[in-house]
Amino acid sequence: MVNAVRGTRNWLACLLLLAGFWSGGPKAAFCGEELVLLNWEEYMDRSLLDAFEKESGIHVRELFFETEEARDALLAQTGGEGYDLVVVQAKDIQAYAHSGWLAPIPVDKIPNLKQVAAKWRSTYPEAEQYGVPWLWGTLGIGYRADLVKGPVNSWLELLRPDATLKGRIMMLSDAIAMRTIAMKALGHSMNDVSKAVLEGSAELLRAQKPFVHTYGYMGLGEKSPLITGQYWMALMFNGDAITLSNMEPNIAFVVPKEGTLLWVDCFTIAKASKKQEQAARLIDFLHRPKNAARLAEHLHFATVNEGAAPFLSAEYRRNPIINPPQEVMERSEFPKNLPPKVISQFKSLHTQLTHQD
């Protein structure tokens, strides 16, 4: 009798959810078990999530953020409630964990964690305890080779641009990324927090501001401003440039000669989630070698999954934008966890650049 009543309640709840959906209410009306993934838009292979649902009976609903700052604000407002998994760069995991937003990774529930090379898991303090890496890559300059004058091979061509680029530049709205590439442009390590380096990089970004149309995240559809020609140059992720170049062959990408920022994206599990075991099941599913290869090829980023190698195409393995040559790696860096005072300075400058005319 209890089961019958419970089933009736579930059926009525589904009817109410569907009624809300058809009346213009919440779009995500799902009557079974559901996980909520907070992620960048267009940063997942939806068909893989559908395959997971078919296998497990668990639906995955994606919610999106446009910038890292927007994601941070969402988590600060909610304490992580309402989300089960969150995509986070490894560099941010320590701060997220200290804020109480993340649950420790249940290693015993993710057998495919053995496919992830140890070097990716231990890149940052506490990243191994609270995150599962999945993709890594570089930052560089995406540009319209048919519109930009001359070759592009230095960060200074983005940060001290030609007059023709005024209003044609997009910068990734990321306080750490912007500041550290300015430091690299001036010939310094991105982890040098001396006063002269910090002041020089800040001045370089302030001088660039009149040339910047937008501080944000590059759309990856056919109406992307880099495809339409609204933007001629952008600070962007390597895989995103490949996605756009497949639609517009005149889009090129370069890791500047000074080197770049290396990043690792991780799946994390929200401490407030009531479905942590199911979240771990999804992470394990996406790290099955064949699935990891499929996801990496779909997004055009390098996978941390060593078992995926036999399933990757020769074209993917040979692509130097996805898999940078050794000389690029040698002049590039992972940004360290910087002192709170320095982070505050970075964020203050970011606010000045993005919110003032």
Image (cartoon, rainbow, N blue to C red):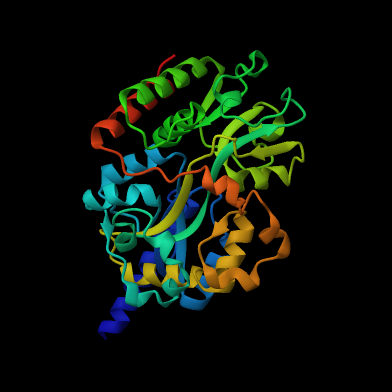
Q: Position of residue 38 (x, y in %)?
A: 41, 52
Q: Is residue 162 left or right of residue 107?
A: right
Q: Residue furthest bottom?
A: 1
Is residue 109 at least partly visible in the picture? yes
* 48 on left or right of 23: right
Residue at x-position 45% and y-position 36%: 177
Residue 214 lies left or right of residue 110; in this view the side is: right
Q: Quick one: quadrant of the N terminus? A: bottom left
Q: Position of residue 215 (x, y in %)?
A: 49, 28
Residue beneath the point at 40% across and 33% down: 175
The residue positioned 47% from the left and 40% from the top of the image is: 66
Instruction: Indicate the position of residue 96 as horizontal and vertical percent values.
Output: 28, 49
Q: Name the residue rendered at 70%, 35% in the picture.
A: 227
Q: Nearer the viewer, residue 117 or 192?
A: 192
Q: Kindly tell me whether residue 20 is visible in this rendering.
A: no
| Viewer-nearest residue: 78 or 321 | 321
Q: Is residue 160 above or below residue 332?
A: above
Q: Position of residue 231 (x, y in %)?
A: 64, 27
